[in-house]
Structures are given as C-alpha cells and as structure tokens.
Image (spheres, rainbow, N blue to C red):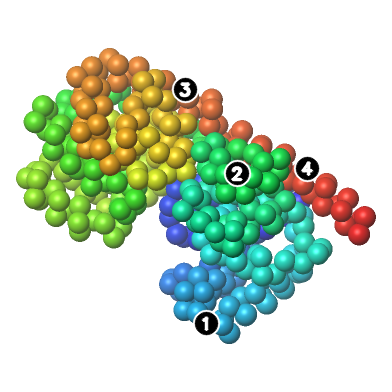
Amino acid sequence: MKLVFVQEVFWPAIGGIEVLSMRALVALRRMGHEPVVVTSSGDDDLPARDEVRGISVYRLPFRRALAGRNIEAVIQCRTELARLKRELRPDVIQLNFSGPSGYYLLATAAPDDPPFVMAIRHPVDELTSTDDALVNRLLRAATWVTGNSRSTLDGARSAVPEIEHRSSVISNGLPAPDRLPADLSFDPPELLCLGRLVHDKGFHVAVEAFAIIRKNFPTARLTIAGDGPARPDLEGQVRRLGLADAVRFTGWVSPDDVPETINKASIVLMPSREESFGLVALESGLMGRPVVASRVGGLPEVVRHRETGFTVPRDDPQAFAGAALRLLEDPDQARRFGQAAREHGLTTFSFDRYVDQYDALYQRLAGRGVERRKAG
C-alpha cells in the first residue's frame, strides 16, 4: 500500500514527533507499505528530492511561502503537491498536523483523492477559535481523525463535534530501549529536565522548584538537557538564584543518547505548560524513572498520579518542589513508582501496538477508498 505523509518538519530536524515518525515509517516499510514523505523545506541546504533510510522524501517551501506571503511561491507549492498526488497515486494520505502545511492539502483537494487521515500531535484548543480556522476545516475534511491522547482527541471533538464517529485515539508508542534501567540512586539526588528549551516546556518553573528543593537537599543537582531559544533566559535565572554550581546545561542530546541521559536521573521533571502526549514522560518511564509532571493535556495519561509519579498544577513551583521532595524523602516509593512507570510504558504504549493500529486503519480506509472509486 502506498502511503503519503504530509508533515511540517522531517528528518534531519530532530524532535520527539520527528523521531517517532521516522521509527513508524521504517516499521511500516518493513510491513510491506510504501511510505512517502512530503514536508516543508527548512533553512538547511537539503535537496528537494531525497531518500532517508529507504523513505522517499519530497521537500517544498510550504512554510517560507506562507510566512513570506509570497503568492507565486504558494501557487507553485500547490501545483507541485497536486502533481505529486497524481503521480504517486497513494492509497491513503496522512497529515501529521502541527502547522500550516495542511493548508496545501485543502487547496489541492480533488474528487478522486484517496482517504485522508488527520493525525493530531499537538493541542488544538488555541487553534480552533473560529469555524474558519485551518484546523477546523481540516477536521471537517478528514476521512478519519486520530489523536495521540484522549485529551488531544477530546479537544478536536469539542471543536468539531461531527468527527466523533470518524475519529479514534491512537496513543504514541515507543520501543523498549536497548539499555536496561539502572538502579535509582539518590547519592546525590539527580533531577532532570529534557526537551526543547522553549517557554511552553516550563523549565523556568523547574529551576524555581529546584531552588526550593536545594534547601532540603543541598547536594541535589539539576541537569537541563536540550537546546533552544529559552536557554539564555534559563541560564540567567540559574545565576540569579545562586544555583550555577548545581545546574548543568548539556545542550542538544542525540536521540540515541536519551536513554543513557535519563538513566543518570533520580527523578524527571516535566513542567510543561501544554502537552498533547508527553514523549519524554514515556521515555522516562521506560527507563524506570518516576516523573513529576504538569497536570495538562495528555500527561496524566502517561504519568499516573500516585502510581508512576505525581501530576501537579502547571506553573506552580511550590507544587513541583513538594512532589519531588516526597520522592526524594522516600526512595522506596520512588523505586516503586519507577518500576510501575516502566510496566505502564511497556504494556499501554508499546510501539508494535502503535504501528499495528495505524496499519489496521490504513487497510480499512484503503478498502473504503477503492469502493468509493468503483462507485464513482
């Protein structure tokens, strides 16, 4: 089966969604599918036509054309995408929705298009303020809608109630890391924040909470692993709070090094201000680490309160510090939470289950598409 995936960014751009997408595409190819990716060309000097790990990739200036309000470039992108759809003749098109690239799918819609899956990977609440918002139009146009968490799908159904009977949850899934979890150590206590250093990840809340934690555990250390535009502000905050000797910034972490980074932690902090799912929480659980997370979006589905970690109100350093201190003061409880987190990750969010659910959806929709074309 030929599958065309339209998404905002793709390899070599590195983020949780991009890593998950690559793993899924490789797995689908091994199952006999022919996945093709159509994505925005970024600022990198990358070829318009490429192959990455056996996956054909087409790059078009989707974002640049819209951001620059370059009408000629927008029309060119539309023309090229329409040509690709005719040439590739996919059985199913999937939009991994996270940005304006979906506009081009709407603009090139044709009566003989194959079934269209809209996979929502980001919270949609702030994007659905009017009936004409791009996400609303895409939700109404989609043959089927998937949400990577119950929270994400509920937000989409609230925005466009008519999709209730053509939508489902397909939770993110990850394979078990090759490396086994190390025993939790608290000598000294090691806290970890992992992800893109942007305001919505809430790492400034973790730094403020860490200042409180240090009053009770003076030897505690915090590692902030990742990079992004918020790094200078975070470094300044660390200096102002007198924490420079206890906080380490690692910079960007390769996906291959994520399990080992997590393995060094006693507790993982996820103070996200919004989160559709929370891949870092799942990665941490698979490494047997308890997580203290904001009670937002899909995070409570990954971090089970008082079972695999704690969920607390967002933007509340006191609450984050209090939850972390409970774990630091009771290492046995922290270890029980970590073991439960690993089991929860392996059973509820298995990678095979994730890929099999999408495979079954494609098979069902492709059959429906064939019937529709015969009827036409």
Q: Are marks 3 and 1 in contact (CB under 8 Å)?
A: no
Question: What residue is at 23 percent from the left and 41 percent from the top?
Answer: 206
Indicate the secondary structure of the residue bearing disc 3. helix
Question: What residue is at 15 percent from the left and 31 percent from the top?
Answer: 213
Report how far apart the C-alphas of labels 4 and 3 lie in the structure: 31 Å
Residue 157: numbered disc: 2
Task: Name the mark nearer the viewer: 3 or 2.
Answer: 2
**Which amino acid, by three-letter code, is at mark 4?**
Arg
Report how far apart the C-alphas of labels 2 and 1 lie in the structure: 33 Å
Residue 157, position in %: x, y? 60, 44
Residue 70: numbered disc: 1
Task: Name the mark nearer the viewer: 3 or 1.
Answer: 1
Report how far apart the C-alphas of labels 3 and 2 lie in the structure: 30 Å
Q: Earlier in the sequence, mark 3 or mark 1?
A: 1
Indicate the secondary structure of the residue bearing disc 4. helix
The answer to whether residue 360 is visible is yes
User: To which residue does mark 4 refer?
Assistant: 364
The quadrant where residue 85 appears: bottom right
Task: Name the mark nearer the viewer: 2 or 4.
Answer: 2
Question: What residue is at 60 percent from the left and 70 percent from the top?
Answer: 49
Nearest the viewer among 255 and 234 is: 234
Residue 323, position in %: x, y? 26, 27
User: To which residue does mark 3 refer?
Assistant: 343
- Quadrant (top left, top right, bottom left, bottom right) of the C terminus: bottom right
